[in-house]
Image (tube, grey):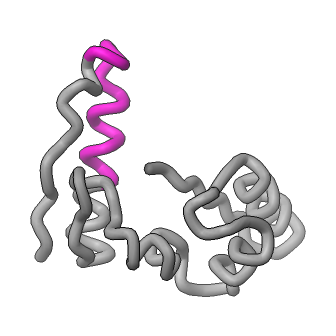
């Protein structure tokens, strides 16, 4: 198993509710336990190579191929979330991809 990695120290200042800190930790745990990938600067960051190879997207249904058609890797935005959500609603599966960094 990979390490959870260093967590961003200013999350509690940005978000006093603690949600942001817990969300980033959840991403770190998922990256380490489920994806089994190393981290970059912080535990919730994929390495540049893993991010560019779409390791944060579900591996089925051609989702990352669709993302590459809509935007450049690393320039993920609301259009991609909208595109994937609409694609999921048109298919028999409901999918929503949220990319964070």
The quadrant of the picture occupied by the N terminus is bottom left
* Relative vertical location of residue 7 with respect to residue 33 in this rendering, above or below: above
* Quadrant hosting residue 84: bottom right
* Quadrant hosting residue 62: bottom right
* Residue numbers of the magenta segment: 13-27
Q: Where is residue 23 in the image (x, y as percent from the top left)?
A: 35, 40
* Quadrant hosting residue 85: bottom right
Q: Where is residue 38 in the image (x, y as percent from the top left)?
A: 22, 72
Left or right: 11 as drawn, with respect to 72: left
Q: Is the magenta stretch mostly helix, strand or loop?
A: helix
Q: Where is residue 9 in the image (x, y as percent from the top left)?
A: 18, 30
Residue 24 shown in magenta: yes
* Relative vertical location of residue 97 with respect to residue 58 in this rendering, above or below: above
> Depth check: 90 or 10 in front?
10
* Relative vertical location of residue 27 with respect to residue 91 in this rendering, above or below: above
Question: Which residue is drawn at the image coordinates 71% and 54% (left, top)?
Answer: 81
Question: Which residue is drawn at the image coordinates 34% and 65% (left, top)?
Answer: 46
Left or right: 24 as drawn, with respect to 72: left
Left or right: 46 as drawn, with respect to 92: left
Question: Which residue is drawn at the image coordinates 78% and 76% (left, top)?
Answer: 69
Left or right: 54 as drawn, with respect to 76: left
> Depth check: 91 or 5 in front?
5
Residue 100 shown in magenta: no
> Depth check: 30 or 79 in front?
79
Q: How many marks?
A: 0
């Amino acid at each position: 198993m990979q390490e959870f990695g260093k967590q961003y120290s200013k999350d509690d200042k940005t978000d006093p509710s603690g949600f942001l800190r817990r969300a980033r930790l959840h991403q770190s745990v998922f990256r380490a336990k489920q994806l089994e990938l190393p981290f970059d600067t912080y535990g919730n960051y994929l390495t540049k190579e893993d991010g560019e190879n779409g390791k944060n997207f579900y591996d089925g249904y051609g989702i990352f191929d669709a993302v590459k058609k809509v935007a450049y890797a690393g320039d993920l935005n609301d259009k991609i979330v909208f595109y994937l959500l609409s694609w999921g609603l048109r298919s028999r599966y409901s999918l929503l991809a949220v990319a964070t960094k």
